[in-house]
Image: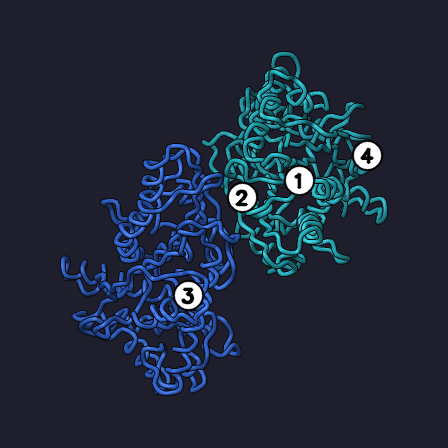
Chain colours: A blue, B cyan
């Protein structure tokens, strides 16, 4: 379940296009996050010793269709080219096997309305790997800068169902502990693979969903609590007999939002394989990125327009889990009808009482380095 | 127009599946060619000094969906692993941007009925580049073994229309000279890019469509001349008023089949940039690979079955050029109707008089090396 579902897709065309250089509202929030992380990438490129005898390799782990990171990659390549006019440059896009790599290549090759960097650089080599970041992706010692945004909250597996909620933010006791432990082990796995791939002196820049110092997380900053709405509507469907008890329980997102302390732990523990592999956390800070749909609503004030634009982005990264929770015996049409009704209900709620709805992003921005 | 259209596609499902380890008749001929080239690949791997400090990199240029080369790649990786238990191995699949890379990754990740090698090797890194082989694909000095089969007859551009035929095998005079010159320049371009990518001591193994020493080429070995049939049916459509004169003329495949001498020339001319870049032709020989559809027909004797199975493989690599030759003003439905009628006519011919029809492959198998 690795991969940047939150980053949208060129195929998600139920979101209207808008002008002014924005290609889709569904991806613009995730793009704001990556644009904000670009300064961290450029700082690493600036201080790094550049490789000799091989290409500088930049990898985007959980790249989705590559659209949200395209300006970050252009800026990174520009900074590298400014430092060395002849250094071969390699960009490797990585995501899980089911990602749409055709859409990725169309975007990166400049075949869409998104402006690509591909023809702006000589000596540039772009490739893609259909490999989860829970596995080795690149050859050892071949990675100079590993980037990832809004992807690593997806766990490699669901440790258990959450009895009374749909996401670990609503878990308690043993269930919460199981998710925290899964998150801990998955984070260690991700970092150990990246440590092996990194060249000495190489860096990682990640913008990962988190639970911040004030206890905030995605869709829970001010106002309506997004994950509670997901849960309460799903529970209403149970109460109304639209779904069964087992179906209610099986809706558990394989996600976990770590705190700054949880992100930092494996770097700081001298006994951890991450520390042993030479990875050191250079900096970490949390940031809130406002929901672009709620911001738009503040401007236009049209509740129906807001609801119609907002729900598809929630749907894009939750629908497959809701669908999978429904009993297979229902058949695909009946399952889809329940799913459609579910998001219609959420949309109706937003339309009727839009104030406070919104999905602010809460990220931990971090830089780590492999000792030279 | 680079890319292995002849190698079929996992999407070409109008060809029936068959058992016995063959996944599709549409690709089995092309697979036979690659299986035959595997010994050349293994011989190069055997004699080569293996890299230190980086992954051994094998690239398949014009890979299509990767299905036809999957056993070759498995054999190559096995030979490398036998020589070195720990050497990181990289496979890079390369094809033009419009190739179906999602299908490729599904096959290579073992998500189809085709048995993949992916889980058979530790330390294996698979990626793809959506880049034509007429451009730089890999960083300089990073390629150990470059492979290509049944792809490099596609020219980078069509130098002119061929007035009286659909393929350069039917061209004469200035038109033939223009195609030969385009083929010469394109071949030099391909080799210069590969020479730059190859590490010293690295090798290229290509199985390219050719015109052999006896004047034979694809679909012209014994019996019916395939390209003449293409041309004569297209001309009949002109005579019947189904297409116009300009449409008849515009049907020119951007392909050229080189002779052994033409393939060898840039390696042997000391003034050529290919020779200057250190590429040397080690061996070249031509081989005929029998048409699997005609072979099947010999067994079953059912002309209708043969015609129904045979025409889709011709269609797979010619249809887009025929479609493109038709006037845009007709609109897509009318153009498609003409195309459908065209292949129906060819199929009716084969059904009525099947003897002699068939598309034997005629390849030049070659090995080249970059001086160490």
The residue indicated by pointer 4 is B356
Q: Chain of mark 3?
A: A
Cβ–Cβ under 8 Å for marks 4 and 3: no
Expressed as whole percent of the image width and height from the top left, the position of residue B75 reads 71, 50
Foreground pick, B268 / A28: B268
Q: Chain of mark 1?
A: B
Tell me how far mark 4 sits from mark 2, CA to CA.
Answer: 33 Å
Q: Chain of mark 2?
A: B
The residue indicated by pointer 2 is B99
Q: Chain of mark 4?
A: B
Q: Are marks 4 and 3 on the same chain?
A: no
Q: Are marks 1 and 2 on the same chain?
A: yes
- Mark 1 or mark 4: name the one nearer the start of the chain: 1
Cβ–Cβ under 8 Å for marks 4 and 2: no
Q: Is residue A58 above or below residue A342?
A: above
Q: Is residue B209 above or below residue B178?
A: below
- Mark 1 or mark 2: name the one nearer the start of the chain: 2
SS under mark 1: helix
Viewer-side label of 4, 2: 2
The residue indicated by pointer 3 is A275
Q: Looking at the rendered structure, which numbered label has been put on residue B344?
A: 1
Residue B141 falls in which quadrant of the image? top right
Viewer-side label of 3, 2: 3
Tell me how far mark 3 sits from mark 2, CA to CA.
Answer: 42 Å
SS under mark 3: helix
Viewer-side label of 1, 4: 4
- Mark 4 or mark 2: name the one nearer the start of the chain: 2
Q: Are marks 1 and 4 on the same chain?
A: yes
Q: Is residue B244 visible?
A: no
């Amino acid at each position: 379940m690795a991969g940047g579902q939150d980053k949208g897709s060129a195929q998600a065309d139920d979101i209207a296009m808008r002008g002014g250089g924005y290609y889709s509202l569904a991806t613009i929030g995730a793009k704001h996050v990556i644009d904000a992380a670009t300064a961290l990438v450029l700082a690493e490129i600036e201080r790094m010793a550049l490789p000799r005898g091989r290409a500088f390799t930049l990898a985007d782990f959980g790249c989705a269709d590559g659209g949200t990171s395209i300006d970050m990659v252009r800026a990174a390549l520009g900074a590298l080219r400014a430092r060395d006019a002849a250094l071969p440059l390699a960009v490797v896009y990585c995501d899980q096997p089911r990602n749409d790599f055709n859409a990725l290549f169309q975007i990166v090759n400049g075949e869409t309305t998104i402006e690509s960097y591909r023809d702006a650089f000589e000596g540039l080599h772009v490739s893609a790997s259909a490999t989860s970041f829970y596995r080795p992706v690149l050859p050892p010692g071949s990675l100079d800068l590993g980037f990832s945004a809004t992807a690593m909250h997806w766990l490699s597996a669901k440790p258990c169902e959450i009895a009374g909620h749909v996401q670990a933010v609503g878990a308690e006791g043993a269930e919460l502990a199981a998710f925290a432990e899964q998150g801990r082990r998955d984070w260690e796995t991700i970092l150990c693979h990246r440590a092996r791939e990194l060249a000495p002196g190489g860096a990682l820049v990640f913008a990962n969903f988190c639970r911040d110092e004030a206890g905030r997380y995605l869709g829970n900053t001010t106002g309506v609590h997004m994950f509670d709405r997901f849960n309460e509507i799903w529970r209403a469907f149970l109460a109304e007999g639209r779904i069964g008890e087992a179906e209610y329980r099986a809706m558990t997102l394989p996600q976990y939002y770590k705190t700054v302390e949880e992100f930092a732990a494996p770097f700081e523990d001298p006994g951890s394989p991450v520390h042993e592999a030479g990875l050191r956390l250079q900096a970490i800070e949390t940031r809130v990125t406002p929901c672009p749909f709620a911001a738009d609503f503040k401007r236009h004030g049209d509740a129906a327009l807001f609801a119609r634009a907002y729900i598809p982005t929630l749907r894009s990264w939750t629908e497959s889990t809701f669908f999978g929770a429904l009993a297979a015996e229902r058949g695909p049409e009946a399952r889809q009808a329940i799913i459609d009704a579910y998001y219609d209900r959420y949309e109706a709620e937003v339309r009727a009482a839009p104030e406070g709805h919104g999905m602010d992003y809460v990220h931990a921005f971090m830089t780590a380095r492999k000792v030279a």
